[in-house]
Every structure is written in structure tokens, then in C-alpha cells.
Image (spheres, rainbow, N blue to C red):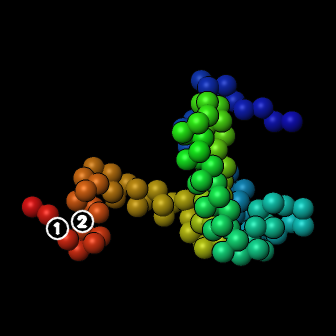
Amino acid sequence: MKTAPKKAERIPGRTLVGLFTTVEQRKRTMPRHSYVAALIRAGRDAIGCKLAEETGEVIKAVREQDRTRKVKEFCDLFFHAFVLMAHQGLTLDQVEAELARRHGICGLDEKARRKGKRKA
């Protein structure tokens, strides 16, 4: 069984990149006994429902549960978001590029721009 690297050994983002790489690999090979492959076979709507379920669990954990439970629920949310991204042919690089583009932009200005309503 794998153990997580010690905190000092971890490189930020490496685990997320590794997870997304594994999800993409499972999508390509579609192994019979793979949860990712089963979700991909079930399709966009099924993955979306699972993502919505995990979002609800994050909200519940944030309101009612301890830090360990919150972290676990966020892990589930990220995992299922990665599966939906892979299903849709999106890459982690594309999402990262969009986050980089938005970095330093006021969130309120960005929202107004998307709605076509620029406030002074």
C-alpha cells in the first residue's frame, strides 16, 4: 500500500497532476475494474450528478464536521471534477491557464464582464 510523502517532501500540485494523469489514462484504457472507467461509461449526466452530490457533501462537512472530514470531502469533489473534465476532453493545463489569466483580476469585475455589465 502506498503512503503519502511526508509534508516536507511534497511538491505543491504534484499529487493533483498525478491524479489527473491517472484519470486521463483510465479514460484512454477503460479498464474493466476501474471506478473512473465506470463513471466515464455512465456518461456526462451521471458524472455531473456525482459531482453535485459531492458538492453537497462538502457543504455539509463545512457546516458540521471536523477538519479531517472536510479535507476528505474536498478530495472527493476534486476527484469527481477531474473525471468530468477528462470526460469532456478538458485538461488541467487549460484550467490552470484560465486561473492564471484571472489571477490578479478583481472577482467582481470579472463577474460583471461575463454578464456584460461593467460597473464604474
Residue drawn at (60%, 73%) of the image: 89
The circle on residue 46 is none
Residue 91 can be seen in this image:
yes
Residue drawn at (59%, 66%) of the image: 85
| Residue 108 image offset from top left, x and y in percent | 25, 56
Q: Are marks 2 and 1 in contact (CB under 8 Å)?
A: yes
Image position of 28 (left or right of 93)? right
| Residue 47 image offset from top left, x and y in percent | 68, 67
Image position of 99 (left or right of 88)? left
Q: What amino acid type should be assigned to the residue bearing mark 1?
A: Arg
Question: Which residue is farthest front?
Answer: 64
Q: Label 2: which residue?
A: 112
Q: Label 1: which residue?
A: 118
Asked if residue 72 is positioned above or below residue 24 in the image, the reply reads above
Q: What amino acid type should be assigned to the residue bearing mark 2?
A: Ala
Question: How many other residues sit within 10 Å of disc 1, few (<14), some (14-19) or many (≥20)?
Answer: few
Question: Which residue is farthest left?
Answer: 120
Q: Secondary structure at mark 1?
A: loop
